[in-house]
Amino acid sequence: MADKTKNKTENKTGNWALNKSRISQATGRLGAGLDTLRTWWDGAQVWQRYVVYLLLVVGALILPAPAIGSFMSPESDWTTILIHPIGTYVLLAMGLNVVVGQAGLLDLGYVAFFAIGGYSLAYFGTEYGWNFWATLVMGTMMTGVSGVILGAPTLRLRGDYLAIVTLGFGEIVRITASNTDEIGGARGITNIPHPPPIFGTEFALDPAPYYYLIVSVIVVVIIFAKRLEKSRVGRAWAAIREDEDAAELMGVPTFKFKLLAFATGAMIGGLAGTVWAGKVIFIEPNNFPFILSATILAAVVLGGQGNIPGVILGAFLIAWIPERLRFLAEYRILIFGAVLVLMMAVRPEGLLPSGRRRAELAEGTGGMGAMGAEVAGPTATDAAIPEARS
Amino acid sequence: MFQDFIDQFGTSTVGGLAVGSIYALVALGYTMVYGVLRLINFAHSEIFMIGTFASLWVITTVGISSPLTGIALVGLLALMILVAMVASGGAAIILERVAYRPLRKKGASRLAALISAIGASLFLQELFALEVIPRVFDRPGRNQAAVPRIVDRDVLFSIGNADVRTDHVIIVIAALIMMVGLDQLVNRTRIGRGIRATAQDPEAAVLMGVSIDTIVRVTFALGGAMAGVAGVLYAMEFENIYYNVGFILGIKAFTAAVLGGIGNLRGALLGGIVLGLIENWGAIFLGSQWKDVIAFIVLVLILMFRPTGILGESLQQARA
C-alpha cells in the first residue's frame, strides 16, 4: 500500500508537466532544452566558451537591426524597447540577483535604488549642471550608501520581516520624492541632461547610442558580478543563503557580508537608474511604483535566481513579453499575470537555475525554504497520506 | 502644533480605531495563511478588493439611494457581509487551487510562490478592470466607483472632545464580532485544531491524520471571508472603490500583521489597531500626505527592537 502511494506520487511529480495541457508541455520542453544547454556549457572547453561570448557580443550588437525588430516588436520602436524596458530590466535584475539570488535576502523595495540613481542624475544635472559621467559615478556611490543606510538597521531581521521592511523603504522613497518640493514633488524633474558626446557620437533623439551605452554597462556589470560570484565574497553569500547560522559558526561575518550584498545590489540599481534617466529627460515619482520591484523580482525568479545568464534571460522575457503582447492592447497585463502563475507552476526553479540552486531545491529547502505546509524531503513531497485517504 | 494635537487627539483616535479594525481584519488573512504555509499571500489584497465590489453590488441590486437607519441598516449590512464573505472566500479558495497548490505539490521554493502570487494579483486586478466592473456595474473599469452612502455620519456620542460617529461604531463592532468568531473557530473547533496543528508542525499533523489540503483550503476561505468583511466596511466608510483599491490597504494590512507578529492572530488585531492609531496621530503633526511614511518608519523602529513583532510569531499559541 505504501509503495503504491509512493509510486503514484512519483509519477505525478515526475511527469507532471506532461500530464498537463499543451502550453505547459511546451514550457516543460523549453525547460528541458535549457537544461541540456546547461549541461553542455558545464563541460565546454575554454575556447568553446570564448566562441559563445563572441557570438553573444555580436548578437547584442546586431540586435537592434530592423529585421529582428519587425518580429520582436512590430508595434513600437525596437531599439527604444531594447533600452527601456529590456536594458534597464536586465541591469536591475542583475543587481537584485546579487541580493536575492546570491545572498538569499528577499528585497521587495529594490525600485528605491533605481529611483535614487535616477533622481541623483536629475537633481545634480539640472540644479548644478553636472556632467553625466560624473553623476553616474556619484549616483552609483550614493545608492551604495543608501543601501548601507537601509541595511544597517534592518539586516538583522530575517526572511519575511526583511521583505516587508524593504517594501516599506521602497514606498518611503517614492512618497518622500512626491512630497518634497526641492526635487520637483509629484511633478517630477524635467530637462534632465543627456550624456555628452563620446567619440563624436551625439546622444540625442536617436536611440542607437543609448543602446550601445547600456549594452556596455551591462557587459561591465556581468563581468563584475561574475568575478564577485567566484570570489570569497560570493562563496560567503552562498553560505549565508544556504544556512545563515552554519555560516556564522564557520566564521563568516554574516552581517558584514549581507550589508555588502545590499550595497552592491543597490549600486547596480542606482547605475541602472542614472543610465535610464540620461535617456528619458523626464522623471517623476510614479516611475517607481512597487509593481516595478515585483516585476524585477519576477524576472530574477523566472530566469533562475543566482545564475546570471538565467537572470538576464528572465529579465529579457519579462520586459519583452508585455511589449510583444501589445496587439492584445489592454489585455496584455492580464495575460502577463496568468503567464507568471503558469510558469511558476510548471518550472518553479526558474528557466535556467544555477547548479547549486537546483541541488538545494532537490533537497526540498530551496535556500529560501519551502512553503510551510509541505512535508520536506523528496519522498513525501505530495503530502501523500491525506490524498490516499480521500 | 501641540494645541492642534490636543484638539484633534480624540477624533483622530476614534478614526484610527476604525481604520485599524479594517487593517486588522485584512491582516488576519495574511497572518493565517502565513502561519500555515509560510507564504506571503500577495493576492490577498485582491480578495479584499472583490469584497468591496461585492458590497457595491449588493447596494446597487437592492437599490439603496438614501442612508438607512435601524433594522433596515442592520439587515442590509448583514446581507452585504454575507455576500462579500462568500465572494471573497470563494475567490480565495480558487486562488489557492490555481496559483498555490500546484507549487506546493512540487515542493517549490517560497519565492516561486511569491511570484505566482504577484502574477495572480495582477491577473485579478486586470480581470476586474477589463471584464467584471464594465460588465457588472456598467461603468469604465479603471475609474473610481462611488458607493452610495448607506449610513449617516451622525455623531452618536462624545467622549471629552472626541466625537464618535455611527459608522465608526459599526466598523469596530462588526470587526470585533468577526474576530471573536474567528478566534472561537480556531481555538475551539476540530478544524481549528487542525489549523493550529498544521501551523505548528505540518509533518506531524499529517501523521496524526490531518488532511493538509483541506486545512489549507479552509485557511484560505477563512482569511478570504475576513477580507470580504473588511471590504464591506471599507466601502461603507470610504465610499470610493477602484480596481486596485487593495494595493495600499494590502500593504498596510501586511505591515500590521508583521507589526503584531506574523502568524499570530492576536498580533494581527493589535498590529492593525496600533498602525491605525499611529498613522492618524502622526498625520496631525506632519499632514496626511506623510501617513504611509509614518506607518513604515514605525514598522522599522518596532522591528529593530522586537524582531518578531510586538507579540511574537506562531499561530498555534494564539489564544486571543
Image (cartoon, rainbow, N blue to C red):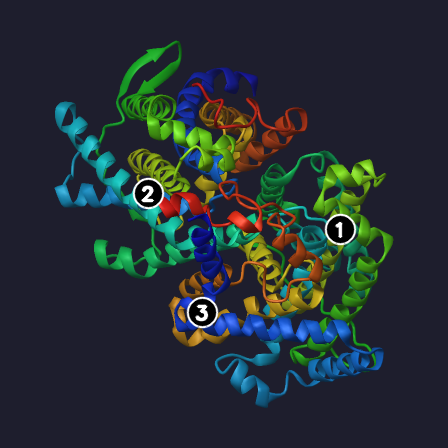
Q: Which mark is residue A18?
A: 3
Quadrant of the image for the C terminus of chain A? top left
Q: Secondary structure at mark 3?
A: helix
Residue depicted at x 49% and y 63%: A346
Chain letter of the residue carrying label 3: A
Q: Of the residues tagged 3 and 2, which is closer to the observer?
A: 3
Q: Nearer the viewer, residue A143 or A233?
A: A233
Q: Which mark is residue A238?
A: 1
Are there few (<14), some (14-19), or many (20+) residues within 10 Å of tag 1? many
Q: Of the residues tagged 2 and 1, which is closer to the observer?
A: 1
Task: Name the residue that disc number 2 marks.
Answer: B240
Q: Is residue A311 above or below residue B152?
A: below
In the drawing, does residue B225 fall left or right of residue B116?
left
What amino acid type is highlighted by mark number 2?
Asn
In the drawing, does residue A72 fall left or right of residue A154?
left
Are the residues at dot 3 and dot 2 in contact (C-beta closer than 8 Å)? no
